[in-house]
Image (cartoon, rainbow, N blue to C red):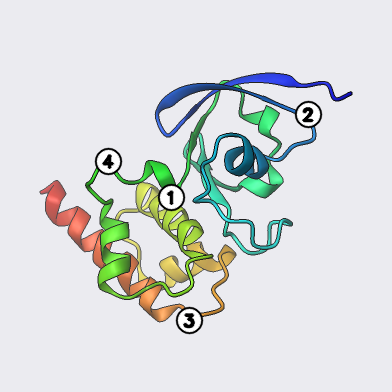
């Protein structure tokens, strides 16, 4: 019989309580328990970035974080980027720049790009490529993704004015 742990946290700005086994990853709990299936399981060893989430504003691979570690913390998943029917500027520019194909890597890239723009609202192309280097794409290449992040940064700067 498993020993379940009760975890109280905030996910996408909503307080939530869930039960999990001490060995369960945050990715497993997000997808299977909480039915937040936007974060994808690509490699399950921290090498692809498909499961990227923000943990207290810091970019992490949810496959490498134990769910019990998020107690009392704030988690932002891809589902938390949009506000109702209003897409985040990154989501909008990824669509406009065709910066996605199969979709497995897209949530991780979007979350990683949000972390970058939260940290540095005016990144250079080099900084974007460096920041997103933990995310792998096997379909699009990276140029369209970089251009989409640049466009989102410009759009967000224009709105801030």
SS category of the residue bearing label 2:
loop
Q: How many marks?
A: 4
Q: Residue 140 at what x, y percent from top left? A: 46, 80
- In three-dimensional space, the C-alpha distance between marks 1 and 4, rounded to whole angstroms, equals 17 Å
Question: Is 159 displayed left or right of 84 in the figure?
Answer: left
Contact flag, marks 1 and 4 (Cβ < 8 Å): no
Q: Quadrant of the N terminus?
A: top right
Relative to 77, residue 149 above or below: below
Mark 1: give few (<14), some (14-19) or many (20+) Cα within 10 Å: many
Q: Residue 123 at what x, y percent from top left? A: 35, 62
Residue lying furthest left: 161
**First along the sequence among labels 1 and 2:** 2
Q: Is residue 127 visible?
A: yes
Residue identified by numbered label 4: 83
**First along the sequence among labels 1 and 3:** 1
**First along the sequence among labels 1 and 4:** 4
Residue 115, numbered label: 1
SS category of the residue bearing label 4:
loop
- In three-dimensional space, the C-alpha distance between marks 2 and 3, rounded to whole angstroms, equals 37 Å
Q: Residue 82 at what x, y percent from top left? A: 31, 46
Q: Is residue 150 visible?
A: no
- In three-dimensional space, the C-alpha distance between marks 1 and 3, rounded to whole angstroms, equals 21 Å
Residue 22, numbered label: 2
- In three-dimensional space, the C-alpha distance between marks 4 and 2, rounded to whole angstroms, equals 32 Å
- In three-dimensional space, the C-alpha distance between marks 3 and 4, rounded to whole angstroms, equals 28 Å
- The image quarter in which residue 148 lies: bottom left
Residue identified by numbered label 3: 141
Question: Is 89 displayed left or right of 14 in the figure?
Answer: left
At x 42%, y 34%, the residue is 12
Relative to 135, residue 19 above or below: above
């Amino acid at each position: 019989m498993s020993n379940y742990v009760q975890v109280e946290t905030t996910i996408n700005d909503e307080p939530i309580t869930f039960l999990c086994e001490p060995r369960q990853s945050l990715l497993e709990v997000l997808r299977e328990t909480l039915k937040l299936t936007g974060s994808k399981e690509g490699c399950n060893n921290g090498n692809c970035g498909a499961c990227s989430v923000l943990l207290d504003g810091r970019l992490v691979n949810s496959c490498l974080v134990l769910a019990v570690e998020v107690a009392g913390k704030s988690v932002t998943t891809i589902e938390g980027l949009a506000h109702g029917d209003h897409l985040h500027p990154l989501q909008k520019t990824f669509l406009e720049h065709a910066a996605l194909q199969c979709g497995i890597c897209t949530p991780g890239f979007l979350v990683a790009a949000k972390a970058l723009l939260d940290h540095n609202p005016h990144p250079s192309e080099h900084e974007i490529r460096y920041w997103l280097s933990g995310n792998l794409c096997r379909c699009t290449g990276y140029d369209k993704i970089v251009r989409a992040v640049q466009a989102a940064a410009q759009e967000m700067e224009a709105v801030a004015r």
